[in-house]
């Protein structure tokens, strides 16, 4: 996108302030949890474990930079980091893996390489016997239509077992129980969006009206200037009323069953766990649903490649996982979560920190 000198200056200043805040935000929880990191070694008594990874964004192209030219993107090497993660999960015998979206990069579309890139990524996951559940991000929709994704290997709802069908033909959200007493919920953060929705559809038109109300830029991928309004860009999206009602019903039943729930989404929903530009449009509505249910323990997302973490006043932990695409070849970015009766322990690899996640 083309940006004036003033706009570039604002973006640079805004970036500098955001970077300073992120450095504090990312390090503070680490310093508070590191004294308990010895508990990471006591994993034999875990009830079960699962793997998490975000923003692989593989493309068979040379390295590049992000839009603001502040971070390098390792397109071709991202699949090598995925290989390491899959090998680790196979060796540690996790119960399942949650892939948090953006499995391949949007650059594949213009090179007519979307299918090849997806085949490359899926081949790595298929080397393991572990079930992988896929969340959809914006780059999925840069490469494929929603209809194509529904019929693709990225539709993992069938792995959830009986009783866990999608909530609607055009909403990719489902839930399942990975172990007795626990429930996982995968959300569709682009349910209301201008990407992945036919321009004639009601949800596309609803999304466009929302964007134009909050973003006066000619290019709607360029964020508004200040604060939380920056989330109103085309590469984000939101949750429909239908999906929010479904989530409320799932969590109500989980409350009654005294289950512990972990929710997954490509887009973060807590302002303290991400940069404003990466937030879901109607994050406040989603947070309101989460806070209304005692069963919710953890919310895990991707999208913000720098990662983030906070604990909501309600006690729910919000984890934004670091993106593989901006992880140098000599390190890694993925996590293995060990689940116990009283807490979860995130054992991070590389850029991803260890965290002790006590239940609310």
Image: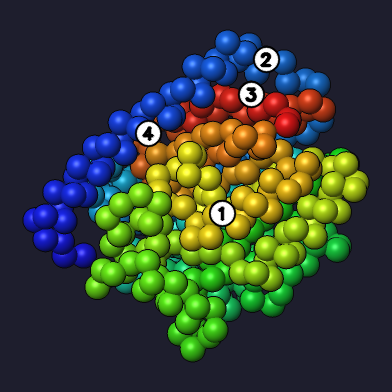
Q: Which residue in the protein does label 4 denote?
A: 22
Q: Secondary structure at mark 4?
A: helix
Q: In this rendering, which labeled residue sits more in front, label 1 or label 4?
A: 1
Q: Which residue in the protein does label 2 denote?
A: 39
Q: In this rendering, which labeled residue sits more in front, label 2 or label 3?
A: 3
Total marks shown come to: 4
Q: Secondary structure at mark 1?
A: helix
Q: Alpha-carbon neighbours of circle 2 within 10 Å: few (<14), some, or many (≥20)?
A: few
- Look at the numbered discs 3 and 4 and tell me whether their residues touch, using CB distance below 8 Å: no
The part of the image, by quadrant, that contains residue 188 is bottom right
Q: Residue furthest bottom?
A: 200
Q: Secondary structure at mark 3?
A: strand
Q: In this rendering, which labeled residue sits more in front, label 3 or label 4?
A: 4
Mark 2 or mark 3, earlier in chain: 2
Label 2 – label 3 distance at C-alpha:
8 Å
Mark 3 or mark 4, earlier in chain: 4
Say which mark, if any, is on residue 284: 1
294 relative to 170 in the view: left or right: right
Q: Secondary structure at mark 2?
A: helix
Q: Which residue in the protein does label 3 denote?
A: 356
Mark 4 or mark 2, earlier in chain: 4
Q: x%, y% of residue 95? A: 75, 40
Mark 1 or mark 4, earlier in chain: 4
Label 1 – label 2 distance at C-alpha:
34 Å
Mark 1 or mark 2, earlier in chain: 2
Q: x%, y% of residue 253? A: 86, 54
Q: Alpha-carbon neighbours of circle 4 within 10 Å: few (<14), some, or many (≥20)?
A: many
């Amino acid at each position: 996108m083309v940006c004036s000198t003033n706009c570039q200056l604002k973006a640079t200043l805004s970036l500098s302030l955001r970077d300073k805040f992120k450095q504090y935000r990312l390090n503070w929880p680490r310093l508070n949890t590191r004294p308990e990191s010895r508990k990471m070694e006591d994993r034999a008594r875990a009830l079960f474990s699962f793997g998490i990874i975000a923003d692989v964004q593989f493309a068979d192209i040379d390295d590049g930079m992000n839009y603001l030219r502040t971070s390098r993107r390792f397109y071709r090497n991202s699949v090598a980091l995925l290989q390491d993660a899959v090998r680790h999960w196979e060796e540690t015998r996790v119960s399942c893996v949650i892939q948090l979206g953006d499995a391949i990069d949007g650059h594949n579309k213009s090179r007519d390489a979307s299918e090849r890139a997806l085949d490359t990524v899926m081949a790595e996951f298929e080397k393991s016997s572990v079930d992988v559940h896929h969340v959809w991000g914006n780059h999925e929709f840069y490469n494929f239509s929603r209809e194509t994704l529904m019929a693709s290997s990225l539709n993992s709802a069938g792995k959830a077992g009986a009783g866990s069908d999608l909530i609607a033909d055009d909403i990719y959200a489902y839930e399942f129980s990975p172990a007795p007493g626990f429930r996982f919920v995968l959300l569709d953060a682009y349910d209301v969006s201008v990407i992945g929705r036919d321009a004639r559809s009601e949800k596309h038109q609803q999304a466009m009206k929302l964007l134009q109300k909050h973003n006066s830029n000619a290019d709607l991928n360029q964020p508004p200037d200040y604060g939380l309004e920056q989330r109103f860009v085309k590469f984000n999206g939101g949750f429909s009323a239908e999906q929010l009602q479904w989530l409320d019903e799932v969590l109500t039943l989980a409350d009654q069953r005294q289950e512990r729930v972990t929710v997954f989404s490509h887009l973060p929903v807590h302002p303290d766990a991400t940069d404003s530009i990466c937030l879901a449009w109607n994050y406040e509505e989603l947070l309101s649903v989460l806070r209304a249910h005692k069963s919710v323990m953890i919310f895990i997302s991707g999208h913000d490649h720098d990662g983030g973490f906070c604990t909501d006043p309600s006690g729910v932990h919000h984890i934004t996982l670091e993106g593989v695409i901006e992880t140098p070849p000599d390190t890694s970015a993925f996590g293995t979560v060990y689940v116990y009766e009283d807490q979860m322990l995130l054992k991070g690899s590389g850029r991803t920190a260890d965290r002790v996640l006590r239940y609310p």
